[in-house]
Image: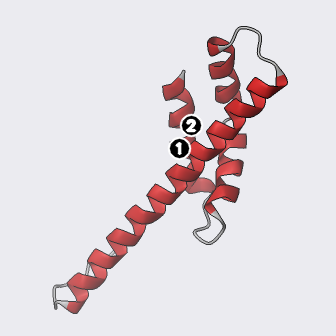
Amino acid sequence: MWKERDDCLLANAPQFDDRSSDARKVGRLVAAACATQTMRLMEMTIPEPDQKARDAFQAESERRAADIVVTFRRVDATAMQRKQQQVDDGAPAPLH
């Protein structure tokens, strides 16, 4: 179940990230999109969850989604720096 939830977060993060909003805000949106997977995960882990457990699972999902957003942004920034370095070094720029 963790994998299903994380796969959902990974798939939705790029769709919600505008690259300028706070990563926590984007994480909340992504986690909301994956609420079904988070609830399934919680129900498999805790047979009779109370509100505190539901809130904790949702908060953990939001933190995980925000981490994914930050990681994706870091990867994008590194790729952009490499492309710029190639241009600065005189290497041919990609045509895409």
Question: Which quadrant: the C terminus?
Answer: bottom left
Mark 1 → mark 2, Cα distance in angstroms: 5 Å
Q: Secondary structure at mark 1?
A: helix
> In percent of the image, x 79 and y 27: which residue is there?
52
Which image quadrant is residue 93 in?
A: bottom left
Is residue 30 left or right of 4 when viewed as pictured? right
23 is higher (above) or lower (below) than 67: below
Is residue 26 left or right of 14 when viewed as pictured? right
- From the viewer's side, name the closer residue of 59 and 3: 59
Q: Residue furthest right?
A: 51
Residue holding disc 1: 11
Question: Which quadrant: the N terminus?
Answer: top right
> In percent of the image, x 24 and y 83: which residue is there?
85
Q: Residue furthest front?
A: 52
Residue holding disc 2: 8
The label number, if any, that marks residue 28 in the structure image: none
> In percent of the image, x 70 and y 58: which residue is there?
25
Looking at the picture, how far across and down is residue 11, in whole percent?
53, 44
- From the viewer's side, name the closer residue of 63 and 94: 63
**How many residues crowd around disc 2 within 10 Å: few (fewer than 14), some, or many (20 or more)?**
many
66 is higher (above) or lower (below) than 18: above
Q: Which amino acid is tagged 2?
A: Cys
